[in-house]
Image (tube, rainbow, N blue to C red):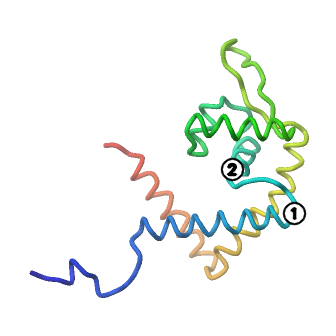
Amino acid sequence: MNTSSVHPASPRESLGVLLGLVRAEVVRAMEAEIADKGLDLRFNQFLILKRLAMLGPMSATELARAVELDGGAMTRQLDQLERKGYLRRCPHEQDRRALRIELTEDGDALWQQLTSCNDRVLAAAQRSLDKTEREQLHAYLERVLRALRDKD
């Protein structure tokens, strides 16, 4: 039996572990940037604000899907952000039973503040890559994501 296929010679992390470690470092760095601004905001709340700022109002279900949270966790995050005045739940224009989540003026102003934090963290994460490598990394990750989402 060829043991090199069981125990690779290189101690490199698997793709899954590596992606998880990169995400954890981005989360840590982003939360540190947010804390440096004196804001009481967690990474998931940052993601919610970012999605609403980038994509506009949406239902809680759409938002939960966009930030990869389950319904219960999404409700808790929305309640906290609403109490802080950063978002509001509004009746849906076409469906009386549904609500749309949207940023308030304070939420939009907060997002404007957080944009620089986001830019700094992502720039730091890619500082050892040149422009071509950054573009390639992005393209590779998009392809990996599409492959994982493609069920055919």
- Nearer the N terminus, badge 2 or badge 1? 1
Vertical side of 143 occupied by 73: above or below:
above
Residue drawn 61% across the image and 45% down it: 67
Q: What's under tag 1, amino acid-wise?
A: Lys
The residue furthest left is 1
Give coordinates of residue 132: x percent, y percent: 59, 75
With 120 as the anchor, is 2 left or right in this view?
left
Vertical side of 67 occupied by 28: above or below:
below
What residue would you read off at disc 1? 37
Residue drawn 21% across the image and 84% down it: 4
Give coordinates of residue 71: x percent, y percent: 58, 34
Please, what secondary structure does the residue beneath circle 1 have?
loop
Q: Nearer the viewer, residue 14 or 51?
A: 14
What separation in Å lies between label 2 and label 1 (alpha carbons)?
A: 17 Å
What residue would you read off at disc 2? 47
Q: Nearer the viewer, residue 43 or 149?
A: 43
Q: Quadrant of residue 49?
A: top right
Residue drawn 42% across the image and 47% down it: 149
Please, what secondary structure does the residue beneath circle 2 have?
helix
